[in-house]
Image (cartoon, rainbow, N blue to C red):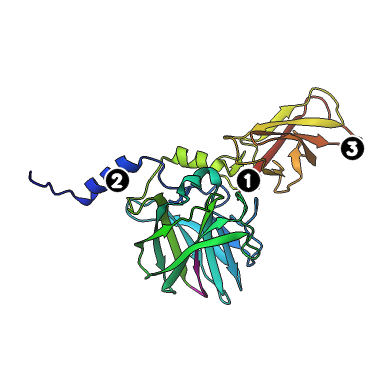
Amino acid sequence: MALTKIDADGLNSNVFNVVGPFRNRFINGGMTIAQRATSATVTAGTTVPTASTGYPSVDRWYVYSTGANVTAAQVAGSGAVKNRLQITGAASVTAVGVGQRIEVANSYDLAGSNATLGVDLANSLLTTVTWTAYYATTADTFGTVGTPTKTQIATGTFTVTSSVMRYTANIAIPAAATTGVEVVFTVGAQISGTWTIGNVQLELGLVSSTFESRSFGAELALCQRYFAKTYDTGTVPGTVTSAGAISTNVNGAWVYAPSGTWCFPVAMRTQPTITLYSTANANTTGVSTADFTDGAATIFSQGASAVSIRRNNVSTGVSSGVDMKSQATASAEL
């Protein structure tokens, strides 16, 4: 029987059929979702990430630096690649890291198996990018960069250039890694220039398949398990707007006026940290009335699927017929 030559696309299609969709254990590996901001300053320090800090720009990817601040930004890709994450260096920077933590629910089956890491990289200044894989000491608890609670699985380096290229590595995941997996990419003294990262993939097996591009809606929903906002998709939290705000109309003069309930787009990983924003200014005082007067807000009911808030008006109360509004974010990062 004659053998048929299969081109690369055909081979990758066959691999896809074997391992199926949603094979990439990273969420937002294509850097297409940036709910917080498309560009942000990363303050130097190692007390990140936490459930609500350390994620400056593209969703699910934490960034840290030491020595000096850097900038993290979602930038345009090239060809069929829409976006990438780019770190801009600065004088006195001694190290930069970009990582993602994969919760137990999405990584448990990797334990005791081989996995393949793939990533697009470029650096205009440095030539070495180090990757390191870990598993959490206890379920979904990795600690911070400065105070880690995790065990190293493996590490390696990629020799990179100023042009974006694809790099891969095989990782033997130990049987003990049933508590969540983390991969961190690091560079040294990025005192200038840029470091570009994109199309990051971690998949079961020893074969590196084509990067899995999920639909924008599917990727956004996956991200919203860890971070959600009342604002429209392209609106940065803290923007002065009522669009999408939690709101209700007060039908009586109440001292503690209900301000509405926000049902999260998807059930979050755990009960999230809520930040409330005024619709009248950039304050995080929480609630504004129809006359744009802010008042203190508190959470009086919360779970992993919804949160209800109220405005505290100590003694003055709120007039009947007033619209109570508040913007909010919810963060349940690892």
Q: What predominant SS class does the magenta segment belong to?
A: loop
Depth check, mark 1 against mark 2: the one in front is 2
Residue count near mark 2 (Cα–Cα under 10 Å), binned few <14, some 14–19, many ≥20: some
Tell me if residue 83 comes above or below residue 22 in the rendering.
below
Q: Earlier in the sequence, mark 2 or mark 3?
A: 2
Mark closer to the chain start, 1 or 3: 3
Residue linked to disc 2: 15
Locate residue 215, reporting x and y percent: 41, 40
Q: Is residue 278 left or right of residue 71?
A: right
Tell me whether the residue at label 1 lies in contact with that at label 3, contact meaning CB atoms closer than 8 angstroms.
no
Measuring from the top left, give residue 158's x and y in whole percent: 40, 68
Residue 189 is one of the magenta-drawn residues? yes
Secondary structure at badge 3 equals: loop
Q: Which residue is mark 1?
A: 332
Note whether 78 is above or below 238 in the view shown.
below
What x and y, as percent, mark residue 16?
31, 43
Q: Say what amino acid the circle numbered 3 marks.
A: Val
C-alpha distance separating marks 1 and 3: 31 Å
Using the numbered discs, state the Cα–Cα distance from disc 2 to disc 3 in whole angstroms.
63 Å
User: Which residue, as the protein is rendered here, is positioned at the far left?
Assistant: 1
Q: Which residue is mark 3?
A: 314
Residue 20 visible, this orientation = yes
User: Alpha-carbon neighbours of circle 1 within 10 Å: few (<14), some, or many (≥20)?
Assistant: many
242, 300: nearer the viewer: 300
Residue type for callout 1: Ala
Whole-number angstrom distance, CA of label 1 to CA of label 2: 33 Å
Disc number lying in front (1 or 3): 1
**Which stretch appears magenta?**
185-192
User: Which is nearer the eye, 79 or 283?
Assistant: 79
Instruction: Say few, some or many: other residues with alpha carbon within 10 Å of mark 3 (under 14 / 14 to 19 / 20 or more).
Output: few
